[in-house]
Amino acid sequence: MSDYYTAKKVLITGGAQGIGRGMAQAFGKAGADVIIADNDKEAGDEAMAWFREQNLAVDFISCDVANEEQVERLMAEIGEKHGHLDVLINNAGIANPEVGPLQEMAMEVFDRVIAVNLRGPLLCTKYALPLLHKAGHPAVLNISSTRAFMSEPDTFPYSASKGGLEALTHALAVSLTSPRIRVNAIAPGWIEVGPWEKESQRYEPHHSQQDKEQHPVGRVGNPVDIAEAALFLCSDKAGFITGQSLTIDGGMTVKMIYT
């Protein structure tokens, strides 16, 4: 991306762990002033330490994206400290797809997943608009999932939230046009986040040959795969792309399986 992201203001929700942390590190290395919003302070402090060791610009703000008052305060604080936003990445989410049989599922579980995974991106985008409008070429990126298009049993809240996020992406893209804000999504497949978790939950991944062969590319994905695409989609090189969803799954969802 050459020097495109130098001093650009990039907010990544859920940026302290997993895919979010991978994206935060990538944007930081590209020269951006990264702002991580996360409700896990332990993970946030660890992410901050990594950035400081690398002499990269970072700010951590605690926030539950499902809470409207907290999101409003988040954007107000960013406005005071940074003045504007060039990129908003709506990544925060509850990534625990399986909830058991429908007849046993508590509706509070469904409501919380929808609140974080779908309502959260809408709230963040709403309250970020004044900051995005101050940028030259603002971009919003939603992190969806291939579970928006296909499911395993008993994944109702997660699949519904990510399907809604896909629809929200194109709805925002055709709505936020005055001034123009590009809005796109990435739908990750199987992404191994073990090494990108906070230290107390970090683990060494192990993938069987069968795990790898499920993917036409021959391996499981990792946060760097998502980060590289995010760098492109949020840059001026993707200036003619909006309202789109890019599936990044190593080809897994196009592989026909017979049993």
Image (cartoon, helix red, strand yellow):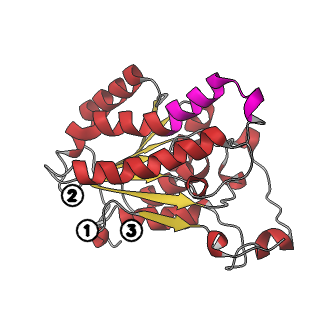
The answer to whether residue 156 shows anywhere in this view is: yes
Indicate which disc residue 232 carries. Answer: 3
Q: Residues within 10 Å of mark 2 (few under 14, many from 20)?
A: some
Q: Earlier in the sequence, mark 3 or mark 1?
A: 3
x%, y% of residue 230?
Answer: 44, 62
Which portion, as a residue range, is magenta? Answer: 102-117
Q: Is residue 211 above or below residue 62?
A: below
**Residue of label 2:** 137
Q: Quadrant of residue 31?
A: bottom left
Q: Decide whether residue 198 is among the magenta residues.
A: no
Query: Could you tell me if the residues under marks 1 and 2 are in contact, i.e. CB atoms within 8 Å?
Result: yes
**Residue of label 1:** 239
Residue at 35 percent of width and 71 percent of height: 1
x%, y% of residue 17?
Answer: 60, 45
The amino acid type of the residue labelled 1 equals Gly
Residue at 38 percent of width and 28 percent of height: 71
* Closer to the camera in the image, 207 or 84: 207
Q: Residues within 10 Å of mark 3 (few under 14, many from 20)?
A: few
Residue at 75 percent of width and 41 percent of height: 201
The answer to whether residue 55 shows anywhere in this view is: no
Q: Earlier in the sequence, mark 1 or mark 2?
A: 2
Q: Is residue 55 above or below residue 212?
A: above
Q: CA distance from mark 3 to mark 2?
A: 13 Å
Residue at 77 percent of width and 72 percent of height: 212
Which of the two marks, 3 or 1, is nearer to us in this view? 1
